[in-house]
Amino acid sequence: MRAAQIASLVWCSVSVIAIVSNVAAQQTSRDAAQPGSRVLMDAHNCYPYGEWWYDRMDRALSAGTPLAIEQDLTWYTDPRTGKSWPVLSHDREANGHEPTMREYFFERVRPIVEKALRDGDRSGWPLITLNLDFKSEEPALLRAVWDMLTDYKDWITTAPRAVDRPRLQPLDVKPILVLTGESDAHQHSRSASSAGSDRVCCRRQLSPLVEQ
């Protein structure tokens, strides 16, 4: 009787292992760009604060990919020249010494992205989910950021522009996925900036597969 119980327990254990292994295999094979397919480490506020923590990007990337990185953006105007540009800052008011997202994020991840594109293994893409948090919503800031994203369009996940907005669109997955906010200002600026294109690159954070 005891031998039969032991045999039954062994069989149950083997069955559980087989089921777990099968689920894990299905999880691995699932499209990594789909919501709920994986859990990512999020490097929150991943930019310098004043003169501190300039190495935050390096520390985040040292954990390996895939991962998520948050960048906070605001609009700075030089009081002497009147020239304005987007900078990375936790505060709405900037002083002009903050780095830009182009230099601090995009050019820093260039080797990672270009290697991924050369290797062509899409199974783990997107490698980096870029979360954008706008501390202000000046139209000029939003336009400047969308224009910057266009400069790196070959790196960024896109979807077809759809007439029927609620309709889910297939993604052309690239090494970077960009998520942004849900305000009307964001939507209008994205629409205006990509008016001449049949593809869009930014997704709302709560519904990343819905064409904007």
Image: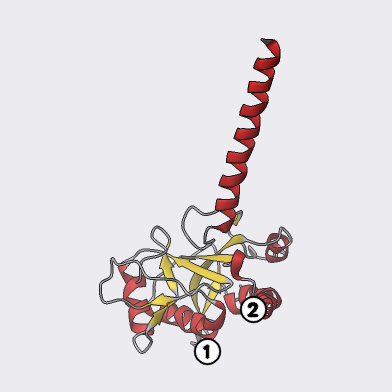
Query: In x, y percent, where is residue 57?
Result: 68, 65
Query: In x, y percent, where is residue 160?
Result: 38, 78
Q: Earlier in the sequence, mark 2 or mark 1?
A: 1
- Quarter where residue 193 is shown: bottom left
Residue at x 64%, y 76% (from the top left corner): 120
Q: Residues within 10 Å of mark 2 (few under 14, many from 20)?
A: some
Residue at x 42%, y 81% (from the top left corner): 143
Residue at x 46%, y 75% (from the top left corner): 158
Is residue 93 shown to the viewer in this render? Answer: no
Q: Which residue is mark 1?
A: 81
In this rendering, which labeled residue sits more in front, label 2 or label 1? 2
Q: Image quadrant for the N terminus?
A: top right
Q: Name which residue type carries label 1.
A: Thr
- Quarter where residue 46 is shown: bottom right
Query: In x, y percent, where is residue 102?
Result: 59, 79
Which residue, as the protein is rendered here, is positioned at the far top? 1
Q: Which residue is mark 2?
A: 117
Q: Nearer the viewer, residue 69 or 139?
A: 69
Callout 2–callout 1 Cβ contact below 8 Å: no
SS type, badge 2: helix
Q: Name which residue type carries label 2.
A: Leu
Per the model, the C-alpha gap separating discs 2 and 1 is 40 Å
Is residue 7 shown to the viewer in this render? Answer: yes
